[in-house]
Amino acid sequence: MTVQIWHNPRCSKSRETLKLLEDKGIQPEIYLYLDEQPTSADIKAVLTKLAIEPRALLRSSEEAYKANNLKDTTLSDDQIIEAMVAHPKLIQRPIVLKDSQARLGRPPELVLEIL
């Protein structure tokens, strides 16, 4: 079983989710998405596994959200994804992936549904 977490060590929910996985005996592959910037293909794959639209993965509290006018509802999915590629802080976290499924760890216990 390969489990991956898109992790931001500075985020409390991300740290809580990683600890939850480790407490369950799972040593996930840790993807530091802020350091190893995801591609649009990476983000599209995650969106498919999460079964959500790109806008649902955006962190609207980030400065880059306001600076790039991402509240504009006329923006295409590709434009939103490209904004996440350019500014990975916009991506909700943590994301846990296993096989063809993924869950957003908000709250952390949601990731248990796919393990």
Image (spheres, grey):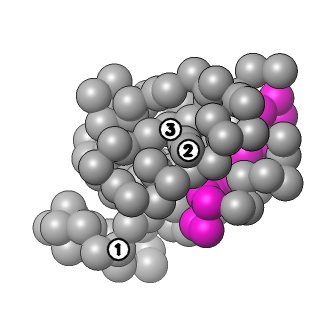
From the image, state whether disc 2 or disc 3 is nearer to you. 2
Q: Residue at x 27, y 28 (%)?
A: 35
Residue 50 visible: no
Looking at numbered disc 1 in the image, what kind of residue is underneath it?
A: Ser
Q: Distance between the residues labelled 3 and 1?
A: 18 Å
Residue 19 is labelled as 2
Q: Crowding at label 2, few (<14), some or many (≥20) Cα neighbours within 10 Å?
A: some
Q: Are marks 2 and 3 in contact (CB under 8 Å)?
A: no
Q: Count of labels shown?
A: 3
Q: Distance between the residues labelled 1 and 2?
A: 26 Å
Q: Distance between the residues labelled 2 and 3?
A: 14 Å
Question: Relative to 24, does residue 64 appear above or below in the rendering?
Answer: below
Q: Which residue is drawn at 39% across and 59% down?
A: 12
Looking at numbered disc 3 in the image, what kind of residue is underneath it?
A: Trp
Q: Do the residues labelled 1 and 2 touch (CB within 8 Å)?
A: no
Q: Mark 3 points at which residue?
A: 6
Residue 49 is labelled as none
Does the magenta portion include 105?
Answer: yes
Q: Mark 1 points at which residue?
A: 60
Looking at numbered disc 2 in the image, what kind of residue is underneath it?
A: Lys
What segment carries the magenta color?
98-108
**Residue 15 locus on image (x, y percent):** 44, 49
